[in-house]
Amino acid sequence: MTTSGRWLRDALLRPSLRLVPATPASDGDDDVALVQGLVEERDWAVRSFWRRYVPLVYGILDRALGSPSESEDLTQEVLFDLFRGIKRLRDPGSLRSFVVACTVLRLRRHLRWMRVRRFLTLSETGTVPEQPTTGPDGPARDLLRRLYGMFDTLSAEDRTAFLLRNIEGFSVLEIAKVTEASPATVKRRIRRAALRVEAFARSDPDLAEYLMVRSDAGKEA
């Protein structure tokens, strides 16, 4: 993981996100039975799927967007996509990859829509109007707002690849699989985003210092 990736991972793993239970590594045989149960619309399968995979879906979306309300809405849309498409899953043992792929697809669509919305809702000064925020107060909230504002300048593809690699810890091959891109393309996207992130941090000393402090604190924990 790059230095900028370590900074961002520590900065984005806010206390509120740590309350989301970590998703245990799934067993392929368990997933086969789970998929069969979902296809047959068994109540136990829905409950098991919820416990096992909803934290994964929500966590990816929340760390990528920094907005609990948007993440909750998108989680519902991802679940709808998953339950609607579960019968088309050819390899039940790859359920986790299917879940991540559906999440990433919804995320990329949402990021593209956000970019269009920003072009259509610029203020008279040419900047995006201030949006109400929740979460940390004071300087920390302002720094997170600037951090996600930087993310907003990235393309949906670059942002998704960069965050999956540096925040979620996915391998290049895993990202290539869930985004349906070649490993070479994924590497280019990550590199392009990393250069933008590092340049942005250099131009914003307060943000760079904040990320460094969070990274150092993470190492000591």
Image: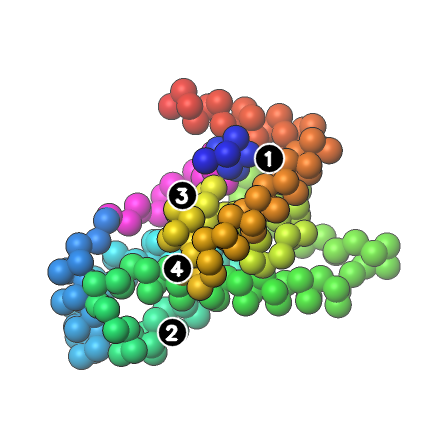
**What distance separates the C-alpha of mark 4 from that of mark 3?**
14 Å
Question: Which numbered disc, 4 or 2, marks the residue that appears first in the sequence?
Answer: 2
Which residue in the structure is indicated by mark 1?
Answer: 140
| Residue 212 in the image, given as x and y percentages of width and height | 56, 26
Disc 1, disc 4: CB below 8 Å? Answer: no
In this rendering, would 37 be left or right of 22? left
Can residue 65 be seen here? The reply is no
* Quarter residue 44 falls in: bottom left
**What distance separates the C-alpha of mark 2 from that of mark 1?**
34 Å
Residue flagged by tag 2: what amino acid is it?
Phe
Identify whether 83 is placed above or below 9: below
Which residue in the structure is indicated by mark 3?
Answer: 169
2 or 1: mark nearer the eye: 2
- Image coloring type: rainbow
**What distance separates the C-alpha of mark 3 from that of mark 1?**
24 Å
Question: Which numbered disc, 3 or 2, marks the residue that appears first in the sequence?
Answer: 2
Q: How crowded is mark 4: few (under 14 residues within 10 Å), some or many (20 or more)?
A: some
Q: How crowded is mark 3: few (under 14 residues within 10 Å), some or many (20 or more)?
A: some
Which residue in the structure is indicated by mark 4?
Answer: 177
Question: Which numbered disc, 1 or 4, marks the residue that appears first in the sequence?
Answer: 1
**What distance separates the C-alpha of mark 4 from that of mark 2?**
21 Å
The quarter of the picture where the N terminus appears is: top left
Which residue in the structure is indicated by mark 2?
Answer: 80
Residue 183 falls within the magenta-colored stretch: no
Task: Identify the residue at horizontal 79%, vertical 54% (top origin).
Answer: 127
Residue flagged by tag 4: what amino acid is it?
Lys
